[in-house]
């Protein structure tokens, strides 16, 4: 576990055979929000650390970019410990959570919508990442300028606690948006990213990025 940015804690599981780091984050404010749960082994390993950081506070939200095991495979583990926590996700992800019986109460956010709390405002950005390339979401925490990029800005290797510096322009060029399966998706993703002004990228896999312009 590493405090990687003000109010932001990073937890990592290293998938050994392929040396892929899977990061999840806790934005620790009055209303704590977990970003990604990791797969079930990760959630089991990190839950005691999260509980220690929360120190008796309840977990308010669980932000999920899309329905995949490293993003939300550990949801049942987290919800068992914090049954009051509410997953926040796209409509497609919500359908999966309901269909698999993983959650009842879910907050659905369309791209461009906000989730506001006492000390944060998350905005969602469209991210074609679901099965059949349907719409998932990325989350931008506007108050601190933290963009949670899930599988964008992806890098293999052991990247726990690592922060690199980059301009936003270069970060977009290296984001992997150009690997989306068709030109229209690539163009829209790049244009959407260009419209953002993050200070910090909290990557799902890879180093975090401090944006220097
Ligand atoms: Fe994914
Ligand atoms: Fe991922």
Image (tube, helix red, strand yellow):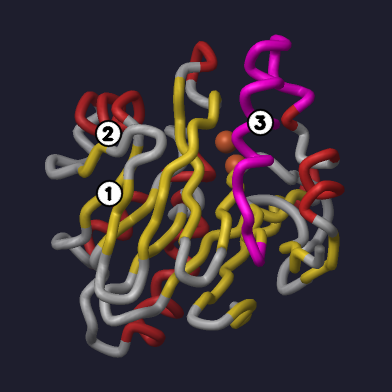
Whole-angstrom CA distance, mark 2 to mark 1, is: 9 Å
Determine the residue positioned at 84% across, 67% down: 165
Could you say where residue 24 lies in the image, as x and y percent from the top left?
53, 60
The local crowd at label 1, few if under 14, some if 14 to 19, many if 20 or more residues have their Cα within 10 Å, is many
Q: In the rendering, which numbered label is found on residue 70?
A: none
Q: Is mark 2 within 8 Å of ligand 1?
A: no
Determine the residue positioned at 83% across, 58% down: 167
Q: In the rendering, which numbered label is found on residue 97?
A: 2
Determine the residue positioned at 38% across, 52% down: 63
Q: Which residues are magenta?
A: 178-200
Looking at the rendered image, the quarter that the N terminus falls into is bottom right
Label 3 or label 2, whichever comes before in sequence order: 2
Asked whether the beta carbons under mark 2 and mark 1 sit within 8 Å of each other, the answer is yes
Q: Quadrant of residue 10?
A: bottom right
In the image, taking residue 199 as reference, residue 157 lies left or right, namely right
The local crowd at label 2, few if under 14, some if 14 to 19, many if 20 or more residues have their Cα within 10 Å, is many
Q: Secondary structure at mark 1?
A: strand
Label 3 or label 1, whichever comes before in sequence order: 1
Q: Secondary structure at mark 3?
A: helix
**Residue on which disc 1 sits:** 87
Q: Is mark 1 within 8 Å of ligand 1?
A: no
């Amino acid at each position: 576990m590493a405090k990687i940015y003000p109010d932001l804690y990073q937890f990592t599981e290293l998938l050994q055979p392929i040396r892929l780091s899977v990061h999840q984050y806790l934005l620790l404010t009055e209303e704590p929000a977990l970003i990604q749960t990791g797969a079930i082994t990760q959630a089991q390993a990190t839950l005691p650390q999260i509980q220690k950081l929360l120190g008796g506070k309840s977990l308010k939200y669980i932000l999920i970019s899309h329905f995949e095991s490293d993003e939300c495979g550990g949801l049942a583990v987290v919800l068992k410990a914090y049954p009051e926590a509410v997953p926040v996700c796209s409509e497609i992800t919500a359908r999966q959570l309901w269909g698999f019986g993983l959650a009842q109460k879910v907050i659905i956010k369309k791209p461009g919508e906000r989730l506001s709390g006492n000390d944060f405002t998350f905005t969602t950005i469209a991210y074609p990442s679901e099965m059949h390339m349907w719409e998932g979401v990325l989350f931008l925490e506007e108050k601190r300028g933290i963009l949670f990029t899930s599988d964008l800005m992806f890098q293999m290797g052991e990247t726990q606690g690592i922060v690199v510096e980059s301009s936003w322009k270069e970060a977009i060029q290296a984001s992997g948006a150009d690997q989306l399966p068709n030109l229209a998706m690539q163009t829209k993703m790049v244009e959407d990213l260009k419209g953002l002004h993050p200070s910090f990228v909290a990557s799902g896999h890879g180093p975090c990025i401090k944006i220097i312009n």
